[in-house]
Image (spheres, coloured by chain):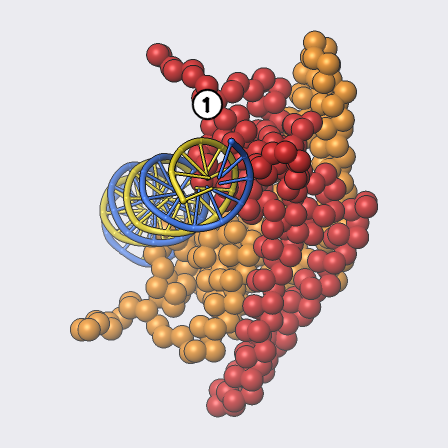
Chain colours: A orange, B red, C yellow, D blue
Amino acid sequence: MASINRKSSLEKLTPLQEEIIGIFIEIAQMLSLPRSLGEIYGMLFLSPEPLTLDDLVKWLGISKGSASQGLRQLKTLGAVRPQYKTGDRREHFSVELELRKIASGFLKEHVEPHLQNTARRLESLDSQLGVTTDHLDYDFLRDRVDRLEGWHRASQEILPLMSTFLKP
Amino acid sequence: MASINRKSSLEKLTPLQEEIIGIFIEIAQMLSLPRSLGEIYGMLFLSPEPLTLDDLVKWLGISKGSASQGLRQLKTLGAVRPQYKTGDRREHFSVELELRKIASGFLKEHVEPHLQNTARRLESLDSQLGVTTDHLDYDFLRDRVDRLEGWHRASQEILPLMSTFLKP
DNA sequence: CAGATTGTTCAAATTACGTTGAATTTCCCC
DNA sequence: GGGGAAATTCAACGTAATTTGAACAATCTG
């Protein structure tokens, strides 16, 4: 009750817009990304014109901090692009609409680092295994480590394929 | 200090075993799954013999509840298989070693439900869009919704491919 | 069937994660 | 260079997810 509605309060979205943003929130959940990323991307997706950080704060009712960090993450994913408007100091943002680019950004950002780290760990495992000659279960461990390495290789081979199968 | 070490306290893993389990913990993180799933799978992966729930509690130092729920999730993923040993009431578990099966279990469990739900939402969007004739930005929204639907279709087509590219 | 063993459930505690908002920094314009 | 709008940072907070553990249910055994 008694909701003030002065100049900088939040604007109202249509049910249709809410629903579309809801879909992006669900996509974010599917990718285990923060809800705010879905909201922000969805909002920009719905806007014919690039929006500023402040627009997002107003429309979505999120904090400036959230908007700022969310936009940063979306930028590093390549899901959102800064648009420089002449005569306006504020940064405006529009969405990347090519799924392939967003997907590869996601992989580069959220999958590759883990794979690289796993690669490092597996190498070190290999050398440790060499030293461990004492147990009679060497063969068993060797087999398991080999299998892990096989999985790792397969994962590394699949990633680039994924982008390939999304049309340019 | 003064750590009791009676019959049911936790057993000690070798550094090599710890490291391998660590790798599975990282894989779990990569997939945004609970750490305990990584631990449990890793422990079973390391064991030549199937293990019981109690073995996992002892070796990993996790609670019975965690082990029980973790095993259930791994079962529904198809990452772990119950092994029935004659003359032993307890359920023993061994790991599934085919990456393809685990991956498809993960997709079926953690991706497909979202995709199906998105499909439902998109259909309802379509009908709502038809009603919304009032705005002049119908063309714009139509375009965006079409694009979303395109993404959705692409995702549905890619999923089955993924399993294909993991060797049987 | 009593007793013992195994496994599950779920509320509470813990931990991890995301969000907020105020302070700070950056950057532009006059 | 001062003033101020725009954006970033980050500690404190709130929320959501996971883990715990004790009560409970199921299952066997003698």
Whether residue B68 is visible: yes
Residue B147: % across, % down: 63, 71
The vertical placement of A52 against A156, above or below, is below
Q: In screen coordinates, is A38 left or right of A99?
A: left
Q: Which residue is mark 1?
A: B8
The vertical placement of A33 against B22, above or below, is below
Q: In screen coordinates, is B19 left or right of A7?
A: right
Whether residue A41 is visible: no
Kindly identify the residue that appears in the image at 35 percent across and 64 percent down: A61
Q: Toward the viewer: D10 or A36?
A: A36
Q: Toward the viewer: A138 or A120?
A: A138
- Residue at the limit of the structure toward the top, as seen here: A134
Kindly identify the residue that appears in the image at 65 percent across and 67 percent down: B152
Q: 10 Å neighbourhood of mark 1: few (<14), some, or many (≥20)? A: few
User: SS for tag 1?
Assistant: loop
Residue B132: % across, % down: 50, 87
The vertical placement of B142 against D26, above or below, is below
Q: Toward the viewer: B22 or A118?
A: B22
Residue B118: % across, % down: 57, 68
Kindly identify the residue that appears in the image at 56 percent across and 20 percent down: B13
Q: In screen coordinates, is C25 left or right of A140?
A: left
Q: For the N terminus of chain B, which image quadrant?
A: top left
- Residue at the limit of the structure toward the right, as seen here: B168
Residue B53: % across, % down: 54, 35
Kindly identify the residue that appears in the image at 46 percent across and 23 percent down: B8
Q: Chain of mark 1?
A: B
For badge 1, the amino acid type reads: Ser
